[in-house]
Amino acid sequence: MCGITGVFDIREQRTPERERLHRMNESQHHRGPDEGDLHIEPGVGFGHRRLSVIDIATGQQPIFNDDKSVALVFNGEVYNYLELMDELRGHGYVFRTKSDSEAIVRAWEHWGEDCVHHLRGMFAFMVHDRRRDCLFMARDRMGVKPLHYAVTDDGWLLFGSELKSIVAHGGLRQEIDPRAIEAYFALGYVPDPWTIYKHAKKLAPGHRLLVKRGQPVGEPQRYWDVKFTLDAKISEAEAAEEMRRRLSESVKLRLKAEVPLGAFLSGGVDSSAVVAAMAQLDSQPVNTCSIGFDDPKFNETEFAKMVADRYKTNHRVEVVGSDDFGLVDTLAHLYDEPYADSSAIPTYRVCELARKHVTVALSGDGGDETFGGYRRYKMHMMEERMRSAFPLAVRRGVFAPLAKLYPKADWAPRVFRAKTTFQAIARSSVDAYFNTMGLVRDPMREQLFSSKLKRELQGWNAVEIFHDHARRAGTDDPLALIQYIDLHTYLPGDINTKVDRASMAHSLEVREPLMDHPLVEWAATLPSSLKLRGQEGKYFFKKAMEPMLPHDVLYRPKMGFSVPLARWLRGPLREATRNALQRGALAQTGWFEPSTITRMLDQHERGALDHSQPLWVLLMFDAFLRNAGLGDAAQRAGH
C-alpha cells in the first residue's frame, strides 16, 4: 500500500524538476512512511511512498524491467500475483523479486494494455515505457484505490494517489467546477471522473488510459463493467453454499502479508461475515477492533462482542465521545475536496485504533451494494411497485399535486412521510432514486444556490450522472438498476474514498473481500429475489451466514456508522457553524443565498426543521475552501 505520483511531458522530453517532484511525493508521506524514492529521466518523473506489506526486503519502487526501459509505480495489492508470476515464467520471464509490483511490470511487457485483465485486486498504477514512448495508467475495477490526473497549460501530465499531490506541483489551475459543486451538494461527494477542479480528473474505476508523447491526452477507456444478467439457475441452498465458498476464497487471498493483520468488526453482517471466514482459515486468533459511542443510539459494540466471543478473537474496543466533532479541518485536509459523509469521523477513529495493533485490516465494505442490503433498496422497491401501476404522465398529474398539499415531516420514519412518498411516485425510477440519495435535494438547492451559480450551471442537474449510468446498466430490473448506479457512484465516490483516506491517514492498509470482482460478477447473475425478499435485504447472504453468525447479528435492524449531527449543530457546533456559513470562506464565494442559509440555521437551531444534512454539507464545503486556501473561490472559478 503506497502513495504514487509523477509527471509526464506530453509534448517534448523536458527533464522534470526534482524539487517539484519531491514536493508532490512528500505531500503523500502518510500513505507510505516506510520508504520513498524518485525516478527522473528526460520526459518523465515518478515518485513513490511505500507502506511495506509484501516482499518487504526487495519490493521498493519505482520498479523496472531488466533494461530499465519500463518503469512502474503502483498503489494497492494484486492478490493473484503468485499465480500470475507462474504464468509469466511459462512465457520465459525471470523474476528478481517476490513482489506483486514486478508481476505488473512483466504483465505489461507481455500483454501491454490488456495486462489489466489479468490482475485481481485493488490497484492504481502508472507505467512508463521508454521504447513505446508512452505512459499507461489504470485503476482497479471497483475503484478501491484512487488515481487523479491533470494536464497543465505548459504540457505536463500530472498524476497522484491524492489530489493534494497534483496541487503540490504548482502548475494546476485551481478553478472550481460549478458542476462539481452541484454534484457535491446533491450527493455529498464529487463523483468520478470529476474532481472539484475543472482541470483535474479522477480515473474512473475499471478504466485505463494510454498517453503517447506528442499526441493529445484522450479519454480513458473502460476495460471492465459489471453485468446484471440475473439469469443464474440456482436454488437458495446452492446460492448460500456457493457464497460461503467464494467468501472463503476471497478472504484467503487477502491474508497474505508480512506484517500484523486483523479486521474491522462493527457488529454488522458484512464485517462479521469477513471475521468469521478469517477465523475458519487461521488457527491463530483474529485481531479485531471496534469503535463504540457513549450514546447507545449509535453504539453497536454489543453485537461485535457476540462475534468476537464466538470466534475468540483478540478484540479491542475504544469508546468515542458522542461529541467527537473536532475532526472537521482534519477531514478537509485528508479529502482534498468537499466530502460530507459524517461517518468519516468514526471511520477515522476505527482506523486510528486498528493501526495501533495491525498494519493491514480486512473490512466488510461493498456487501450492501453487491448483495442488496441497504434499507433504501426496500423503500425504493415498494415505491417501484406503485410506480409500475400507473403511467408516468398519470403519476405526475396525480401524485405531484398531492405531494405539494402534504406538509414536510422529516421527523417521521420515511414510510410514513406521505409528502416524500408522493414525490417519489411522481418521478421516474432513476429520478426517484437520485432524490433518495440526495443530501441537499433539488428544491433546497434551488433556494440555496445564488443566481450567479445557477448561471454557471446553465440548467445542468446532477441527476444526469445517474441517468448516464442507467443508460449503460443493461438491465431494467429495478433492484439491479439501482445497485448498478450505486456500484458506479456511491461505492467508489463515497465509501471507498472514505476508507482510503481515513486508513492511509494512519498508514493502514484496508482490504475488502466483498469487493473481489469475481464475487461481484457472480452475485450479478443471481435473481434479485435472492437479494431482497419481502423486507429482508441481503436475503441469500444472510442465509449463507446462518451457520457462522449469531441470529441477532444477522437479523437485527441495520444501524450504520452514524453520528449525532442534528444535536451537534444545535449545541456544541452551533456558533462555529453559524460563523463559518455566514462570515467564512463559503460566504465570500457568491455562490449561495445568505438569506437561505440564515433561515436554515434559524429553523434548525430552534428545532422547527431538521436541516442537519444540508448544514453539514455547507460546513464541509467551507472547510474545504479554507484548507485549500480558496477564500476567493469565486475569482478562481474563471470569472
Image (tube, rainbow, N blue to C red):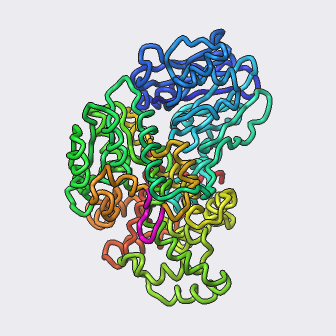
Regarding residue 155, the answer to whether it shows in the image is yes
Residue 118 falls in which quadrant of the image? top right
Image spot of residue 631 (x, y percent):
49, 51
Q: Residue at x 57, y 89 (%)?
A: 401
Task: Give whichever of 495, 626 is nearer the camera.
Answer: 495
Task: Give whichever of 288, 537 is nearer the camera.
Answer: 537
Image spot of residue 223 (x, y percent):
67, 41
Quadrant containing the N terminus is top left
Residue 172 falls in which quadrant of the image? top right
User: In the image, 246: left or right of 277?
Assistant: right
Q: Which residue is drawn at 45% across and 33% down?
A: 253
User: In the image, 240: left or right of 449?
Assistant: left
User: In the image, 202: left or right of 600?
Assistant: right
Regarding residue 333, the answer to whether it shows in the image is no
Residue, far top: 67
Q: Residue at x 71, y 18 (%)?
A: 130
Q: How many callouts does the rendering have?
A: 0
Quadrant containing the C terminus is bottom right
Image spot of residue 618 (x, y percent):
45, 60
Residue 298, compared with residue 292, is above or below; it is below
Task: Give whichever of 371, 15 is nearer the camera.
Answer: 371
Residue 360, compared with residue 547, is above or below; it is above
| Residue numbers of the magenta segment | 531-540
Residue 40 falls inside the magenta stretch: no
Image spot of residue 368 (x, y percent):
45, 56
Residue 537 falls inside the magenta stretch: yes
Task: Give whichever of 4, 622 is nearer the camera.
Answer: 4
Residue 562 falls in which quadrant of the image? bottom left
